[in-house]
Amino acid sequence: MELELVLFRYCPFGQRARIALLAAGLPHQTLYIDPASPPDWFQEVSPLGKVPIVRADGVSIFESAVIAELADDLSDHRLLTTDPVERAFCKSWIEFGSVCQVAFGSVVRADSEEAFRRATGELMGHLRHVEGLLREDSPFFRAAFGLVDISYAPLLTRMLYLNGKIDLFRERDCARLVRWSKAIAEQPAVAHSLPATLDEIVAEYVGHIGPEGFVAKQLGSL
């Protein structure tokens, strides 16, 4: 099967799909397009005008969670448990990962320190629910690196990076989450999922969605 992944360089959802394909061991081509000037065919294959898109033998598939699940279905080694109840449980938290990623976008878009603190509080409130599940008997950890980890990887690696630059969160307040984040960042599929350094990608991401925001100004002052 010929697979081509279409995405923006900085897009966390595109990175999620790329990680899934790499973790699944699926050969694929990667096409990075300019969001300001997408090719003429893009609107035909992406009804929402968003990435990522996977073209599988010419069939276009969108939504990162759907693409990640396709990668699992095509892989010789499963990235998600086959137990029906545990699988549904994990998929619920995969969906919640998208909610957390959107909340992170609100952090980056915040136009004042007050709005930044408010958005950060909401994001960390979401992630406290996740941290409560980070225990050895959780279905998250029944197997090696899988789709739950992948769904949070772009968010957590960017959060760790930003926290080294600005006051985003206190690591001692979410120690299990930080350990999970660092373990995810060390995965080969995550390390090789970006077309440039994390520093460059975060700069592009912030510059695209929050160029006048509090985060951009804090980074610019460093």
Image (cartoon, helix red, strand yellow):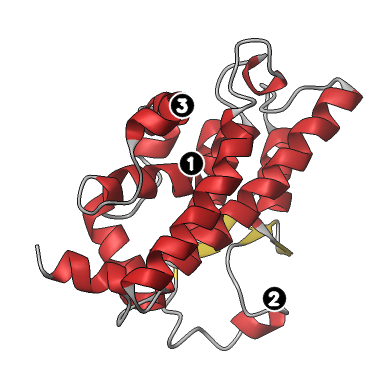
Residue type marked 3: Trp
Who is closer to the viewer here, 45 or 146? Answer: 146
- Could you say whether the residue bearing mark 3 is in a helix, strand or loop? helix
Q: Is residue 77 visible?
A: yes
Q: Nearer the viewer, mark 2 or mark 1?
A: 1
Q: Nearer the viewer, mark 2 or mark 3?
A: 3
Query: Where in the figure is residue 25, as x and y percent of width and height?
Result: 55, 31
Query: Where in the figure is residue 174, as x and y percent of width and height?
Result: 44, 31
- Could you say whether the residue bearing mark 1 is in a helix, strand or loop? helix
Residue type marked 2: Val
Near mark 3 (Cα within 10 A), the count class, few <14, some 14-19 or many ≥20, is: some
Query: Which numbered dot is residue 153?
Result: 1
Instruction: Specify whether 194 is left or right of 17.
Output: left
Query: Where in the figure is residue 10, as x and y percent of width and height?
Result: 39, 63
- Could you say whether the residue bearing mark 2 is in a helix, strand or loop? helix
How far apart, in angstroms, are the residues tagged by discs 2 and 1? 26 Å
How far apart, in angstroms, are the residues tagged by discs 1 and 3? 10 Å
Query: Which numbered dot is residue 90?
Result: none
Residue type marked 1: Ala
Residue at horizontal 66 percent and vertical 21 percent from the top: 77
Q: Is residue 14 visible?
A: no
Who is closer to the viewer here, 78 or 158? Answer: 158
Precedes in sequence: disc 2 or disc 1: 2
Residue at horizontal 40 percent and vertical 45 percent from the top: 193
Query: Where in the figure is residue 104, as x and y percent of width and height?
Result: 48, 59
For label 2, the residue is 45
Residue at horizontal 19 percent and vertical 65 percent from the top: 219
For label 3, the residue is 180
